[in-house]
Amino acid sequence: MKRRVCAILMAASLAVCGLTGCGNGSQGNAGQEKVRLMVWSPSEEQSKESGEWLQTMCESFAEENPQWDITFVYGVADEATAASQVSQDPEASADVFMYANDTLTTMTDANALAKFGGKYREEIEKTNSEEVLKSLTKDGDLYGIPFTTNTWFMYYDKSVFSEEDVKNLDTMLEKGVVSFPFTNSWYLPAFYVGNGCTLFGDGTDESKGVDFGGENAVEVTNYLIDLRNNPNFKIDADGSGIAGLRDGSINAMFSGSWDANAVKEALGDNMGVAALPTYTLNGEEKQMTSYAGSKAIGVNPYSKNMVPAVELALYLGSAKAQEAHYEMRNVIPCNTELLAQENIAADPLVMAQNDTFNRTSILQPFVSKMNNCWVPVENMGKGIRNGSITHENAEEQTESMNEAMNSDGI
């Protein structure tokens, strides 16, 4: 119990004073403090194929901080599952780890994520946009160092579509074949949100609930039924979109920066990248609107080496580390100083991701009740795909989806 109280107090002091002058490592050679840091990341961040980004950055950090004799222990946990692993047993988890911002509530509910305050918060705020910071802020507290925005956009074949064509989905469907992950509930809400449907008010107020019902939502369901039946529309699943780009049977698909290399291999010089298009609903153009968030470096409040852990987290999210991430793994930076550099700002991939994040997306809610929303939307996509949801029952099925999204499953 004492250990738990101390850890919580330590996390509080981080938020208040920025952790100045505390540590408990033993003394090594030449007055160095011996430090052991466990660091978790997805496996691809540590692979030889990607240049061992994590190991490279950690070793560089150690060289720049000779006051510590650091032993790094690496473990594998991707950004989506790190939260559950850390929350289950924070005291046995990594000191520093990478996580997706939509899992923030899982960790804060378990007191498994340190707050950043004082000089550290000032440093983070100085080099990140307000929207990126919002993605890691809860009840006024900042819980991580962002290293990339997390959203999706559109890839297309420039030999089939012009820059004007890709502004509207229905125009594209007249000229080529478009693939979309229809049964994936991270993607399908783009049409509903684009027609005014909302989640938890501004995304942070659970009491407001979800509004994916009513006339606006039914109109979208009917549009999606017609979209599914369009011969130039294909459902992307299990890599079929990229496979189609490769063999020419598909001319556009929706994904994120993680597929950039595969798309480039498929399309070569004909690879085009763009923010989300509009779609035409009842004669009016509506903006497809994706979920957006961030990926961040988090610190375990139970770390026995809190100062080195915080400093390492800041380093892994720094401009230097983000630039290396971009060069080694094509991870799009979010550091505002990097985004101002001409070579980065001119990259079509960077432009598409930032345009989508800033203009055609909403911050993905990370309130607990968001967990109730994924399956009902997935079921809507599957029902339309399978033909069980039709124009005749669209209103009934849309209201059922809305009710399920507002249910706690009891």
Image (spheres, helix red, strand yellow):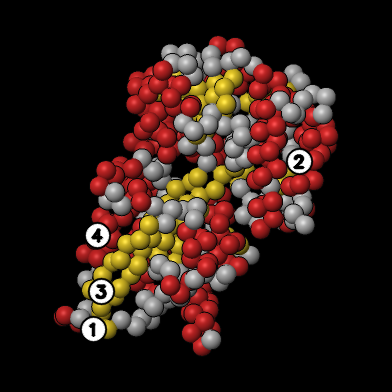
Mark 2 or 1, closer to the camera: 2
Amino acid bearing label 4:
Ser
Residue 193 lies, with reference to residue 166, above or below; the image says below
Residue 24 lies, with reference to residue 243, above or below; the image says below
Mark 4 or 2, closer to the camera: 2
Task: Please tell me how crowded label 4 is: few (under 14), some (14-19), or many (20+) other residues with Cα within 10 Å.
Answer: few
Residue 202 lies, with reference to residue 39, above or below; the image says above
Q: For mark 1, give the secondary structure.
A: strand
Query: Foreground: 265 or 130?
Result: 265
Q: Residue at x 57, y 53 (%)?
A: 102
Which residue position holds label 3?
68
Q: Which mark is residue 60?
A: 4
Q: Is residue 3 left or right of residue 62?
A: right
Q: Residue at x 70, y 32 (%)?
A: 383
Residue 198 lies, with reference to residue 295, above or below; the image says above
Q: For mark 2, give the secondary structure.
A: helix
Is tag 4's residue or tag 3's residue first in the polypeptide sequence? Answer: 4
